[in-house]
Image (cartoon, rainbow, N blue to C red):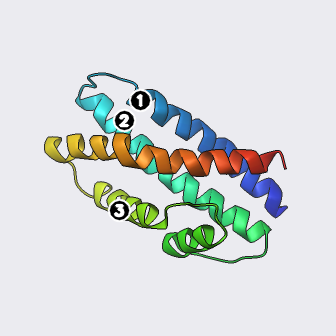
Amino acid sequence: MDKKVRWLQRFDNLENAFLFLQKGLEKKSPDSYQEAGIIKGFELTFELCWKTLKDFLEDKGTIAAYPRDVIKEAFSVQLIRDGSLWLEMLEKRNHLAHIYNETQAQHAIQLIKTRYLAGLEQVYLELKKLCSA
């Protein structure tokens, strides 16, 4: 499969996940099921972001296999503006995937709203621009 086609296909999935996450975060007082959906939406959006970046970088001739390597490469070519935020999101995503309790869920949602959404949006918009280039 053509590498450009692959990252563009992956971007379509990323766009759906990002818009789903945005919509979930618009809820004023989410119930516990909605909170779980927001957290899973963050995990999925993060996963699709780094994989879309990986595919994009491969299309441009850069090979990076693991999330941390992809983040560093994407930062070095200015696809990611805040590398430390992305490394923090990676750690949080790994943590959230293995545990769940109400207190951690509420804390995670606050982080997603106040810190992580902006980082995800920055990369989403950057990739969206590149889709039409």
Q: Which mark is residue 48?
A: none
Q: Amino acid at mark 3?
A: Asn
Image quadrant where residue 12 sits: top right
Q: Residue at x 41, y 49 (%)?
A: 116
Q: Amino acid at mark 1?
A: Gly
- Do the residues under discs 1 and 3 have CB atoms within 8 angstroms? no
Q: Is residue 16 visible?
A: yes
The residue to which callout 3 is attached is: 94
Q: Residue furthest top?
A: 28
Give the mark nearer the N terminus: 1 vs 3. 1
Q: Residue at x 67, y 69 (%)?
A: 77
**Looking at the image, which is closer to me, 114 or 16?**
114
Q: Which mark is residue 24?
A: 1
The residue to which callout 2 is attached is: 37
The answer for how far apart the CA atoms under marks 1 and 3 are is 21 Å
Image quadrant where residue 54 sits: bottom right
